[in-house]
Amino acid sequence: MEKYNENKPIHTGDPVVEAKRACIEHRAIWMALLLDEVRKAGGDMEKVGRAAINRCGVYQAVANYKDHMKDPDSMKEFGDIFVAEPVTFENKVVNINEDEVHVEMHYCPLLTAWRKLGFSDEDCALFCDIAMEGDRQFARDMNAEFCLSKKIAEGDDCCDLKFTRKK
């Protein structure tokens, strides 16, 4: 990896935020260890991981978004829910409107967990990309394109996520 990002949170000390981060880390630990065991057993870790996380995204698109939206096709409403709690991932909203949801995330508790487990930079970057299958599914569900132009797991200063409405 050319760059290395320490991935240190700025906002600390809030017990609610710390609890949310701990839950996300726990989820990341499950994901990584399960995928590592698939790999050790000779399975296609990436294929299994992407399929499973995509299924999770299908479920979450409805349970966490569509079921809570007045207009299930509204990109703005989706974006407002997507960034409703900005501190856990230290979100910076770049733009939210009916055509685009653009957010920078400056801290990743998933990456923190994978590094604690001792996974390589390459594994962390792959786990990150696999984990983004959920967001890719959100985009498909919203009839949008998904772009992840920067990734903390690849040494960037943030994860730059953009959902853009298909024309």
Image (cartoon, rainbow, N blue to C red):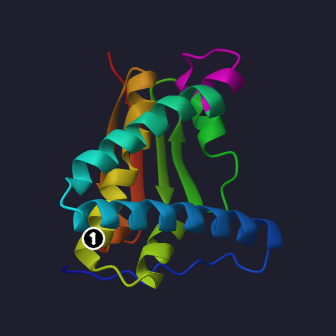
Q: Does dot 1 land on a helix, a strand or a loop? A: helix
- Please, what is the three-letter code of the amino acid marked with disc 1? Asp
Place of residue 99 in the rendered image (x, y in percent of width and height, measured from the top left): 45, 25
Q: Is residue 108 shown in magenta?
A: no
* Quadrant location of the N terminus in the rendered image: bottom left
What's the residue at 54%, 16% (across, down)?
A: 73
What's the residue at 49%, 63% (across, down)?
A: 30
Q: Residue furthest front?
A: 41
Q: Looking at the image, is 27 positioned above or below residue 142?
A: below
What's the residue at 56%, 34% (across, down)?
A: 60
Place of residue 109 in the rendered image (x, y in percent of width and height, measured from the top left): 54, 69
What's the residue at 66%, 70% (across, down)?
A: 22
Place of residue 96 in the rendered image (x, y in percent of width and height, measured from the top left): 54, 36
Q: Total label count?
A: 1
* Quadrant location of the C terminus in the rendered image: top left
**Residue 22 located left or right of residue 19:** left
Q: Which residue is mark 1?
A: 123
Residue 55 shows up from this direction? yes
Q: Is residue 75 shown in magenta?
A: yes
Q: Looking at the image, is 33 positioned above or below residue 121?
A: above
Looking at the rendering, the stretch of residues picked out in magenta corresponds to 65-77
Q: Crowdedness of circle 1 by 10 Å Cα count: few (<14), some, many (20+)?
A: some
Place of residue 95 in the rendered image (x, y in percent of width and height, measured from the top left): 51, 41
Q: Quadrant of residue 89?
A: bottom right
Q: Looking at the image, is 23 positioned above or below residue 74?
A: below
Who is closer to the viewer here, 114 or 39?
39
**Residue 90 located left or right of residue 144:** right
Q: Looking at the image, is 139 positioned above or below residue 149?
A: above
Who is closer to the viewer here, 48 or 147?
48
